[in-house]
Image: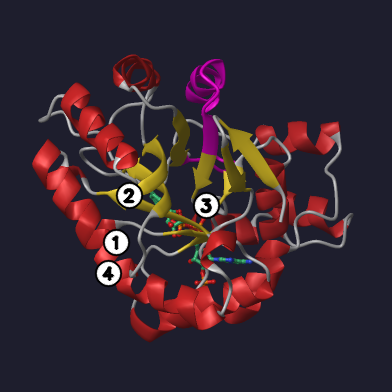
Amino acid sequence: MQTIEAHGARIPLLGLGTWELRGRQCARLVEQALRLGYRHIDTAQIYENERDVGEGIRASGIKRSEVFVTTKVWMAHFAPNDLQRSVKESLVKLRLTDVDLLLLHWPNPQIPLSETLGALCRVKQEGYTRHIGVSNFTVALIEAAVQFSTEPIVTNQIELHPYLDQSKVIAACKRHGISITAYCPIARGRAGSDEVLARIGRGHGKTASQVSLRYLVQQGFVVIPRTSRVERLSENMAIFDFELTAKEMDEIRGLAHASGRLLDVAWAPRWD
Ligand SMILES: NC(=O)c1ccc[n+]([C@@H]2O[C@H](COP(=O)([O-])OP(=O)(O)OC[C@H]3O[C@@H](n4cnc5c(N)ncnc54)[C@H](OP(=O)(O)O)[C@@H]3O)[C@@H](O)[C@H]2O)c1
């Protein structure tokens, strides 16, 4: 599995997203994904599936050291004591002694970022996670986070797919050596039926979804597509054996539009 490096973290370019997967289905998909060669699993406290993810990892028989596990602290747990307690709970559910990457899931304007980041750095220093990062952070928040954090921030996990232009926040992350993890990388399934992506894919013997994922990994972004179907795990993995031309990349870039954002959450911060 290809990886990218950010501040000493080696992150597999492809991971399995697990939002909305629960119970035995979740455990089975994680197990199957790892058996097929996935080496990166993305979960979160708010997904309520950390127990199932942990079960899937154990059932796969893949050594713990070979799997990159990310979880995310929910914004309701950003007060320093809550953060530490919630991370310990996550590890109990996952049945792991540590995770590879621990993210702040969404910005929480109610609690000073300096306090939350201080707590995040402490849990890293105490050995509960190997690396730390953020998610859904804007340009301004990235600048603030870099200033407040005593530990390197290795990723910003953001919504990213062909319909959304995130060039400003990507540039800000790049300036600080922060990698980008693309969530909703097949636009929650929409890219799978896109005619432009399908046409480009035909020229490479690939599907529209594979083109969407390739477009992102070819720019050095980590992708974490989610599927509930075992047969799609292999499809979403077969994105490292072809290359899009500069002209194709430009055409895909042209699909971005002002209302391309999919996660229309009332409390989501505006991107600057
Ligand atoms: N940090 C955050 O705030 C945040 C927010 C959202 C998501 N995430 C993370 O990012 C992951 C991915 O995002 P997402 O789950 O929202 O969206 P996504 O991965 O872009 O899309 C998932 C949807 O695409 C379909 N799909 C998967 N593979 C396909 C294929 N090869 N062809 C056609 N359709 C396909 C799936 O349906 P089937 O199940 O039927 O295959 C599912 O409906 C999440 O699971 C989560 O881990 C993080």
Where is the N terminus found, in terms of image quarters?
Answer: bottom right
Given contact means CB atoms under 8 Å apart, are the residues at marks 2 and 1 in contact?
Answer: yes
Callout 1, which amino acid?
Answer: Leu
Given contact means CB atoms under 8 Å apart, are the residues at marks 1 and 4 in contact?
Answer: yes
Q: Which sits in the foreground, 193 or 121?
A: 121
Q: Is residue 177 above or below residue 53?
A: above
Given contact means CB atoms under 8 Å apart, are the residues at marks 2 and 4 in contact?
Answer: no
**Which residue is disc 3 drawn over?**
187
Q: Nearer the viewer, mark 3 or mark 4?
A: 4
Given contact means CB atoms under 8 Å apart, are the residues at marks 3 and 1 in contact?
Answer: no
Looking at the picture, how far across and down is residue 72, in whole percent?
32, 49
**Which residue is disc 1 drawn over?**
91
Callout 4, which amino acid?
Answer: Lys
Q: Count of labels shown? A: 4
- What is the quadrant of residue 93 in the picture? bottom left
Looking at the picture, how far across and down is residue 49, in whole percent?
32, 70
Graded by Cα atoms within 10 Å as few (under 14), some (14 to 19) or many (20 or more), the crowding at tag 1 reads: some
Q: Which mark is residue 103?
A: none
Callout 3, which amino acid?
Answer: Ala
Q: Nearer the viewer, mark 2 or mark 4?
A: 2
Q: Residue at x 51, y 27 (%)?
A: 178
**Which residue is disc 2 drawn over?**
128
User: Ligand 1 closer than 8 Å to the CB at disc 3?
Assistant: yes
Q: CA distance from mark 3 to mark 4?
A: 29 Å
Q: Mark 2: which secondary structure? A: loop
Q: Residue at x 60, y 54 (%)?
A: 191
Q: CA distance from mark 2 to mark 4?
A: 13 Å
**Which residue is disc 4 drawn over?**
93
In the figure, is residue 211 to the left or right of 159? right
- Identify the magenta region: 159-180
In the figure, is residue 183 to the left or right of 237? left
